């Protein structure tokens, strides 16, 4: 989840994010570095062999599950899925069960649900598919949009941009002035009542950040023009804006059904390096931008000037109709110019969105699922390797101690932080048969050679030996 908080002391806007359980270290780097920490050379070779056997075994475990995931998605692929569903001759209830099974497999892969205030055209999105899933699989703190689309995220960074932002600053000033006018005229209540149901205030969002932050959370500060105190000094000087970025974003949704045809396709799209401020580019059925505060000011100024000019012309003793016509034509022409400029800007915006989608979209559909499957395997392998290494080097440990030791190792040796998933790691170690528990519940591992014997020679090793033999002959 993502949550916006404000620091009451300095009015900073900070995003609170759940710390990921993903280990942000490449597997080859992890295994080689851990092997180099082992004292004896022979043990290093055994450890590297164990790492490969662990990966081959875990990959085999997931093979059938991922095949099921791919088979299910082939029925809901927006391009060819409808034809395959027709060939299956399934009832609507059977199709409902299959699509819920697909979502269950999908939601087992990684972090998800980023709660952000983005505006989409809800009438074009299905609201039944995900709503049914979360009714059957309840989750806490679901965002308002969870019945329409789901966002998975992985990896977080910071994007900074320094510039003068002259036009953007003017827009912010006009927007603040416009908001002040609406408050004074009490029109704000009328306009805000329409959107109050869509933007419910979360009482947690205004909590003051305390020094005792939970260990499984991290914070990223947003520096935006909209929240800055604009003065004459920074109005004419360069400023730096800052946004959290997400290394990978996956969006899942279904389009709304038409009156004549029920929509069964499920869209799965994969993006890279998305700043939080640009999250709208990854969302389905985005709403077109409306007039900016600057455009509205131009319209209002044009209308007021035109009205005053016409009144002035009429009040003259001999009002010249041609003068009035010229004034009105000029005002109408200026308004039309402003409107067409807005239309041109909107076309530019759409082109920018298209280009951004092209540049930042990694894959969609089956390709995205293959990425997810490989990511899951890599993370599982790294969890098992680190846990076994800690038990091998540091001896017996309770589940809580093992969790802390693994996180400390990642921090001390690689300078990275993560919320280590110790439960999943020890489950797989026990399933492999290379870790057990003593009479008081502490975990301990077998020796390296014994661990390799227990797992045994894998199919991949036999294939590689056969390939080497045929190559040598």
Image (cartoon, rainbow, N blue to C red):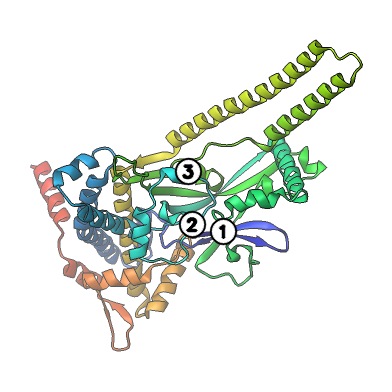
Q: Residue at x 29, y 47 (%)?
A: 370
Residue 99 screen position, x and y as percent: 27, 53
| Mark 1 vs 2, N-terminal side | 2
Would you say the residues marked 1 and 2 are in contact, meaning their CB atoms lie under 8 Å apart?
yes
| Mark 3 vs 1, N-terminal side | 3
In the image, residue 312 sits, relative to residue 191, either above or below, namely above
Q: Alpha carbon of mark 3 to alpha carbon of mark 1: how far?
A: 18 Å
Within 10 Å of the Cα at label 1, are there few (<14), some (14-19), or many (20+) other Cα atoms? Answer: few
Give SS at disc 2. helix
| Mark 2 vs 3, N-terminal side | 3
Which residue in the structure is indicated by mark 2?
Answer: 144
Q: Residue at x 58, y 25 (%)?
A: 344
Q: Alpha carbon of mark 2 to alpha carbon of mark 3: how far?
A: 14 Å
Residue that lies at the very extreme toward the right in this rendered image: 317
Q: Residue at x 36, y 64 (%)?
A: 135
Give SS at disc 3. loop
Which residue in the structure is indicated by mark 3?
Answer: 121
Q: Answer yes or no: is residue 66 visible.
A: no
In the image, residue 379 sits, relative to residue 402, either above or below, namely above
Q: Alpha carbon of mark 1 to alpha carbon of mark 2: how far?
A: 8 Å
Please give left or right for residue 245 compared with residue 335 in the image. left
Q: Between 321 and 413, which is closer to the camera in this rendering?
A: 321
Which residue in the structure is indicated by mark 1?
Answer: 200
């Amino acid at each position: 989840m993502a949550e916006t908080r404000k620091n009451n002391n300095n009015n900073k806007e900070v995003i609170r994010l759940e710390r990921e359980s993903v280990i942000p270290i490449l597997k080859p780097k992890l295994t080689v570095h851990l092997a180099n920490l082992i004292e004896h050379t022979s043990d290093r070779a055994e450890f590297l062999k164990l790492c490969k056997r662990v990966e081959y075994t875990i990959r085999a475990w997931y093979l059938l599950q991922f095949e099921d995931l791919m088979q299910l998605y082939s029925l809901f692929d927006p391009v060819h899925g409808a034809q395959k569903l027709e060939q299956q001759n399934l009832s609507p209830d059977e199709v409902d069960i299959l699509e819920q099974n697909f979502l269950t497999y999908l939601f087992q892969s990684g972090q998800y649900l980023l709660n952000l205030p983005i505006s989409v055209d809800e009438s074009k999105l299905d609201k039944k598919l995900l709503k049914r899933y979360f009714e059957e699989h309840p989750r806490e703190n679901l965002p308002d949009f969870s019945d329409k689309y789901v966002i998975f995220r992985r990896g977080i960074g910071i994007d900074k941009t320094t510039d003068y932002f002259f036009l953007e600053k003017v827009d912010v000033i006009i927007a603040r002035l416009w908001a002040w006018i609406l408050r004074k005229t009490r029109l704000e209540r009328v306009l805000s009542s329409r959107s109050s149901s869509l933007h419910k205030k979360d009482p947690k969002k205004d909590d003051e950040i305390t020094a005792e932050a939970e260990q499984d959370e991290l914070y990223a500060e947003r520096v935006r023009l909209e929240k800055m105190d604009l003065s004459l000094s920074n109005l004419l000087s360069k400023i730096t804006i800052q946004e959290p970025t997400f290394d990978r974003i996956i969006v899942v949704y279904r389009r709304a059904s038409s009156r004549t045809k029920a929509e069964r396709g499920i869209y799965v799209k994969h993006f890279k390096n998305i700043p939080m401020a640009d999250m709208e580019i990854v969302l389905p059925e985005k709403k077109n931008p409306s007039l900016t505060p600057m455009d509205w000011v131009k319209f209002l100024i044009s209308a007021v000037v035109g009205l005053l000019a016409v009144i002035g012309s009429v009040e003259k003793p001999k009002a010249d109709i041609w003068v009035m016509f010229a004034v009105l034509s000029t005002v109408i022409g200026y308004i039309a110019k402003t409107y067409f400029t807005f239309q041109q800007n909107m076309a530019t915006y759409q082109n920018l969105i298209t280009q951004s989608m092209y540049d930042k979209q990694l894959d969609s559909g089956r390709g995205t699922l293959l990425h997810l499957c490989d990511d899951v395997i890599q993370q599982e392998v790294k969890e098992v390797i680190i846990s076994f290494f800690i038990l091998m080097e540091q001896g017996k440990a309770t589940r809580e101690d093992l969790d802390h030791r693994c996180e400390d190792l990642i921090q001390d040796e690689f300078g990275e932080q993560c919320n280590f998933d110790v439960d999943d790691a020890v489950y797989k170690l026990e399933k492999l048969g290379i870790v057990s528990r003593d009479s008081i519940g502490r975990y301990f591992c077998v020796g390296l050679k014994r661990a390799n014997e227990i797992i045994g020679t894998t199919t991949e090793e036999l294939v590689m030996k056969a390939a080497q033999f045929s190559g040598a002959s």
